[in-house]
Image (cartoon, rainbow, N blue to C red):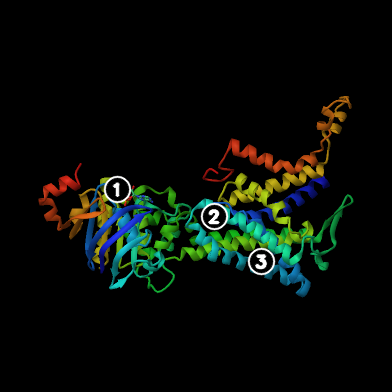
Amino acid sequence: MDVILFTVFNGLLYGMLLFMLSSGLTLIFGMMGVLNFAHASFFMLGAYFAYQISKYIGFVPALFIAPLIVAVCGAMVEKYALRRVHKFGHVAELLFTFGLFYIIEELVQMVWGKVPVGYHVPEFLDFTLFSMSGMGYQAYAMFTLLVSIAIFFALFSVLTKTRAGLIIQAALTHPEIVSSLGHNVPRVFMAVFGLGCALAGLAGVLAGNTLGTEPSMALSLGPIVFVVIVVGGLGSLKGALVASILIGVLQTTAISLDLSINSLIETLGFAVDLESLWHILIDLTISQVAPILPYLLLVVMLIVRPRGLFGNRDV
Amino acid sequence: MIKISNLHAFYGKSHILRGINLTVDKGEIVALLGRNGVGRSTLVKSIMGLVPTTGSILFKDNEIVGNATHDIALKGIGYVPENRDVFSTLTVKENLLLGVKDKNVKAEWTVEEMFSLFPNLKERADVIASAISGGEQQMLTMCRCLMGNPEFMMIDEPTEGLSPQMVETVAELLKKIASKGIAILLVEQKLTIALRLARRVYLMGHGEIVFEGTPKELEKNTSIRKEWLEV
Ligand SMILES: Nc1ncnc2c1ncn2[C@@H]1O[C@H](COP(=O)(O)OP(=O)(O)OP(=O)(O)O)[C@@H](O)[C@H]1O
Ligand SMILES: [Mg+2]
């Protein structure tokens, strides 16, 4: 029972962080019509900025300042580069974000080097909050979970309750009409891009110190974020939320079970011929399979329901 | 109010408008007629800055060709697109509120006035806009545009696909708008309400104006009607 509780907690935490990343990506997709390959790079920038800032003035200011800087970087990229590339169509945009991904990776390596930097959990949050059956739940994990839940509610109320949020919603589906009503749509798009990058940056601030802050972190997280928004349905925030939590719980559950199919069969009373070739397959533990589970889900989803859980357009 | 001279518009390489000249004066309803695909919507979008154009468009004596769409809207031009494009994820009331401009424009129309003009919208104020009927959506897009307090309004095929009764409601609203001194460019395919409401009529064929005159003159001119309007 305790194990299940812990797993759900961890899955929820991982899922909410995924949502922070994927909500921005899915909003930006709604606006550009193409996936932003460089989205996870802004996550990485958030982690590096937080590392640098917390070194000088501490973690708490970094929590606010780093995402803000990432937002400004994102907005500048949209205003001075993407907007110009947009005229040349979707393929050009896609290639642009692809190039941007590598540029950011190279820049990060130039400034901070190839090895991980020492971005650590802040001392005041580095303790065990409570423990059950010998497992400890970290205060920092709880902190991260609470921040992500707060961000989730803030994002939803801004988008559905404020005038700016309504303009964003309308501009995502009908940009020409919104501009013909006198709203500056290019500026709205710049703000959406900045907001999406800020969310990714905040996720980087929160996760960089536990996942490790290194130049390859964008590449290792990027694909899973794509899985989330495709499974949830491109452009759908609700879908991004459900898919994030689904994938978060799925992965953490699979890892914590760590039960080999072999031992399962043995407990059921079958003898297994150890010499057989099958042995290798059977001995795969579920935790070894866990990393491919999200991609399996992606492939199945694309075959069964290409528009994703809540999407309204096909991939 | 608006004076268009020698306007050309392009979609990529295809040359859609070939030298359009057209004027609309204050408080006047002018109809723009023509068959499918002759470029009426393109003309309206060009005025709104949504299509690349060359030539001249003077609005209250200021050149607006090359301006950004939202600046053109802020200067006082309103556009009601064809296909009654409501913001489908927002409620009726939210649709109306997005018609209000953020700056420079004093609000002459309120949501309450819109509801009194068209009580159906009041009943459905909190309904998601994709769930109301086609006629109601047409009224909503027109009211949404009015909320921005335009001095000149371009309305693209407001009666298409509506029941005769609903067409009358739209015609009534157009009359009310014009009575407030707002100039209207009414794009239509059929003559039905256009001839009744308009003071002047332009007839378009293949990217050019092929006839200009009063509704009476168009009615008399059977050869022009045969060639450019009737099937
Ligand atoms: N986005 C576009 N790209 C390329 N060509 C277009 C585009 N939109 C319209 N056209 C072409 O421009 C021409 C004029 O179209 P427009 O929509 O202005 O016609 P219309 O007179 O409004 O007719 P209707 O509304 O009945 O279709 C048509 O031949 C159409 O195929
Ligand atoms: Mg048209």
Residue occupying image coordinates x 63% and y 51%: A241
Dots 3, 2 in contact, CB < 8 A:
no
Residue at the image point whose x is 88% and y is 49% from the top: A133
Q: CA distance from mark 3 to mark 2?
A: 24 Å
In the image, the residue with mark 1 has its CB under 8 Å from the nearest atom of ligand 1:
yes
Q: Which residue is mark 3?
A: A67
Q: Which chain is disc 1 placed on?
A: B
Crowding at dot 3, Cα within 10 Å, few <14 / some 14-19 / many 20+, comes out as many
Q: Nearer the viewer, residue A117 or A224?
A: A117
B127, A14: nearer the viewer? A14
Of A103 and B30, nearer the camera is: A103
* A153 relative position to A254: left or right: left
Which quadrant would the C terminus of chain A be assigned to in this image? Answer: top right
* Same chain shared by disc 2 and disc 1: no
Q: CA distance from mark 3 to mark 1?
A: 49 Å
Mark 2 sits on what residue?
Answer: A93
Identify the amino acid type marked 1. Gly
Identify which amino acid the numbered label 3 is placed on.
Pro
Nearer the N terminus, badge 3 or badge 2?
Answer: 3
Can residue B104 be seen in the rendering of this structure? yes
Q: Are marks 3 and 2 on the same chain?
A: yes
State the residue position of label 1. B37
Residue A245 image position (x, y, % from top left): 68, 49
Figure quadrant of residue B81: bottom left
Instruction: Answer yes or no: are tags 3 and 1 on the same subunit.
Output: no
Q: x, y (%) of residue A81?
A: 54, 63
Mark 2 is surrounded, within 10 Å at the Cα level, by few (under 14), some (14 to 19) or many (20 or more) other residues, namely many
Task: Give the mark toward the camera: 3 or 1.
Answer: 1
